Image (cartoon, helix red, strand yellow):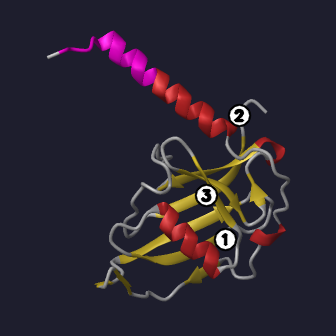
Amino acid sequence: MKRISHIGFTITMLGMLAVGLVAFSVLGFFVDRDITQLSVATPQVTVPQQGGRVAGVSVEPIGQASVIIDDKSGAEPLQVDFPVTPGMTVYDIMQRVTQAFDLNYEVAQGPLGYLTKTIGSATNGTNDSYWQYAINDRTPVEPINTRVIHPGDVIRFTFVQQKGQ
């Protein structure tokens, strides 16, 4: 059985992390920004819980999570409570929220999964800014299509300026 040295393993992991960070930095930073679509008259909205069917099996909501979208335009952030079903990811809930509010929503395929590219009319790369998400005030390392959410989670998308700019 071949053993990998600790130094070799550390170098390999750092290399993989660097490749992922470079790919994240390069993806989707090339479109103009018009953030007027993110303003809503009523910033707090509760969507009624709805069940559904997946592969013929009934899937009932197990609770709600809050989604906050802040484009940093000065307008009140969009805040909505939305039903959570078992196994739902950040990507799943964002598709439903943006569809419910008729907001443009685009993702880019990164080396490990989906990255948010556009919400409303705010697109990565505009004014050296990009979409960042946090769950319960912590920034996850998982891409949005693999990060499972739970009842009570607060998912915040913020359009932030790249550090050093």
Give the residues drawn in magenta, as a range.
2-14
The answer to if 12 sits in the magenta stretch is: yes
Q: Amino acid at mark 3?
A: Phe
Q: Which residue is mark 3?
A: 157
**How far, Cα to Cα, is label 2 from label 3?**
17 Å
Q: Residue at 75% x, 69% y: name it.
A: 38
Q: Which residue is mark 1?
A: 78
Sequence-wise, the earlier of marks 2 and 3 is: 3
Q: Amino acid at mark 2?
A: Lys
Kindly identify which numbered label has been placed on residue 163: 2
Percent across and percent down for residue 8 are 35, 12
Quadrant placement of the C terminus: top right
- Left or right: 161 in relation to 108: right
Placement of 109 over or under 44, stated as above or below: above
**How far, Cα to Cα, is label 1 from label 3?**
10 Å
Q: Element type at marker 2?
A: loop
Kindly identify which numbered label has been placed on residue 69: none
Placement of 23 over or under 99, stated as above or below: above
Percent across and percent down for residue 57 are 28, 83
Placement of 82 over or under 140, stated as above or below: below
Q: Amino acid at mark 1?
A: Leu
Instruction: Name the chief secondary structure element in magenta.
Output: helix
